[in-house]
Image (cartoon, rainbow, N blue to C red):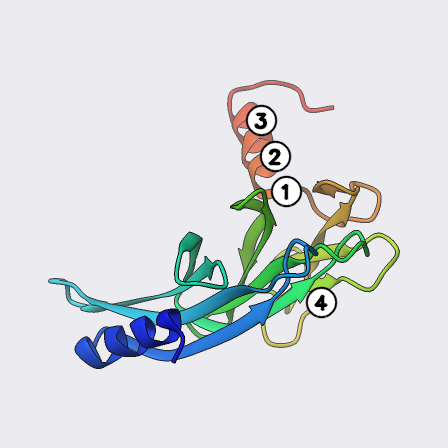
Amino acid sequence: MKPLLLSILILFLITPSAFADIDIHRVDLDNDGEDEIITVYQKWDLLDTPNPWRSESIVSVFYSGDIKIDSFSMPEVMKKIEFVSLNKDGNKCIVAWSHSGMHYTNLAIYKYEDGKLYEIFKNGSACSVELDSEADKPMIKVGRANWSQEGWCYASGEPLWQVYVWDGEEFVYDEQLSTTQPVLKQLHQRWLHAAGYALC
């Protein structure tokens, strides 16, 4: 058995209450002809709080041996993980989706370069998050509540959308395609309004 696989198995057997559902993927992230190994496992922490269990998903990247490169975490329960070439050049990003609560979706995208992981995008919403990675310019849509619409609800209402378009290096907010502003900009404008500044 490969050293990495054996190490993961031993870790799971030693601490079965802390880990569950370990997934292992072999993917050539940097298009060099050698696969990296990506592991995903669920981690549970017991806290001294009224709601004692806290969960997160850990994504780790290893060389083809058992040398760990880097890792990142996602809130709550992992829904799925994908490996997408945003520039259609064979270099693949890690696209991770997780669920929090009843209907909150988290999306994180990391690129692998020179032996390290770099965060490209991270966001979440209770109103849906969508990624179109097949478009000529990949696009992310992050839904936001539309309480100005009478009768709007999370279950059936059409949300307002923040749209981010891939420019070859990062996802950039597109004001023309969006129907609402990023949350931080909204909060900034509310602060200006509350402070008595005129908004243009």
> Which residue lies under the disc numbered 1?
182
SS class, disc 1: loop
Chain-order first, disc 3 or disc 2: 2
> Which residue lies under the disc numbered 3?
193
> Farthest right residue?
136
- Is residue 153 at all visible to an observer of this figure? no
Q: Position of residue 99 (x, y in %)?
A: 48, 70
Contact, mark 2 vs mark 1 (Cβ under 8 Å): yes
Q: Which residue is nearer to you in this view: 132 or 4?
A: 4
Q: CA distance from mark 3 to mark 4?
A: 27 Å
SS class, disc 3: helix
Q: CA distance from mark 1 to mark 3?
A: 17 Å
> Which residue lies under the disc numbered 4?
158
Disc 2 crowd, CA 10 A, few/some/many (<14, 14-19, 20+)? few
Q: Position of residue 165 (x, y in %)?
A: 77, 47
- What residue type is disc 1 on? Pro
Q: From the viewer's perspective, is 81 left or right of 74? A: right
Q: Which residue is nearer to you in this view: 107 or 111?
A: 111
Contact, mark 1 vs mark 4 (Cβ under 8 Å): no
> Which numbered mark, 3 or 4, is in the foreground of this view?
4
Disc 3 crowd, CA 10 A, few/some/many (<14, 14-19, 20+)? few
